[in-house]
Image: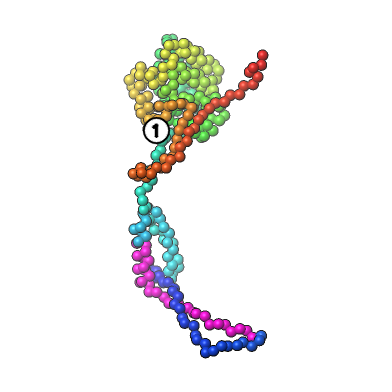
Amino acid sequence: MAAFAVSMQAPVSAPSRAGPHYALRGAAAPTAPESGYTTSTVGVAALSAAAASMLQAGRKSKAGRTQKVLLKSRGGEAMETIPVMPSSPATTEINYYKLDELDAPKIITSMKSALKAMQGKIAVEGPSEDKLGAALCDEEVMSALVSLSRLPVFSKEFGLAFKDDLDLLHALKQIKYFWNLPQSQIAILMSQLAKQLEGPEVAAEFEAFTQELCQSASHLVTIKEVSKKLPAEVHAKYMENAAYLEDADSHAVYPTSIYRQCDALTLATPDAATIESVMSTTITTTIKIARNVLDP
């Protein structure tokens, strides 16, 4: 280990003068004697002991951080990083949402698969309610609905991902809340998806089915209630997703409005004696501008 040394200054008394001194004109003024300093070296052992004592005291007083200390020695200088433990417990942050990562191409693929599967279900003969029930039992349809319900549709990233098709974006933002939507509204939204993703011919089939469903007495029954009449294993999967969303995004299960979402940054001390929070409300809207609507 390199030996450590430090230079300290010791005062030296100025020499005394016997009497006044007068300089000749043009001669340089004599330099007045000043208090001088000499250097002396403190013992290596004493300094090392002092440094060790200071570092040990620092470790005890602070915790969890790191502190850089510059150490000088006869062999050069060295920078040592010393771990310092935190002096107080960590602050607790409350996360209100645990949503999945956005993958736009995957969403498109999933929705196209759901439309294809649903197209086959609504083409058969029978009551429109039974057709929708059969579609909800399909794995592709279920997967598309569940995966979309776990996405941050109110985020800027989601909006930018579908900025080239605003009608598609409008439909996707609503389908996220399928669990509490009337079955007729789900049919309308799927018709919009078909128009944007599959073209007018496929969309026409979905629109015909939607008109048929809207004529039924139960068209306002929510998907949550419809799922109770589905086979037990299918209903269980939808309920599993609802239970997950209660913790990950409770607004998707109990929405006050599918067009509004609240969020917050909440920080609290471990005993919750002090809480700091910044809260926000995000509102989504669709604006359409029409011209000359009152012209004869």
Q: Residue at x 35, y 68 (%)?
A: 49
Seen from this angle, which residue lies furthest bottom? 18
Q: Residue at x 54, y 20 (%)?
A: 195
Reply above or below: 180 against 213.
below
Seen from this angle, which residue lies furthest left? 232
Question: Residue 169, position in %: x, y?
Answer: 52, 27
Residue 32 covered by magenta stretch = yes
Disc 1 marks a residue whose amino acid type is Ala
Question: Residue 267, position in %: x, y?
Answer: 41, 42
Q: Quadrant of the C terminus?
A: top right
Reply above or below: 20 against 64.
below
Camera-side residue of 23 and 207: 23
Q: Residue at x 37, y 56 (%)?
A: 62
Residue 41 covered by magenta stretch = yes
Q: Residue at x 45, y 75 (%)?
A: 9
Residues in magenta?
27-56
Question: Residue 157, position in %: x, y?
Answer: 51, 35
User: How many residues crowd mark 1 within 10 Å: few (<14), some (14–19), many (20+)?
Assistant: some
Q: Is residue 142 left or right of residue 159?
A: left
Residue 123 in view: no
Residue 68 in view: yes
Based on the displayed image, in which of its 4 quarters is residue 201 positioned? top right
Question: Residue 230, position in %: x, y?
Answer: 36, 18
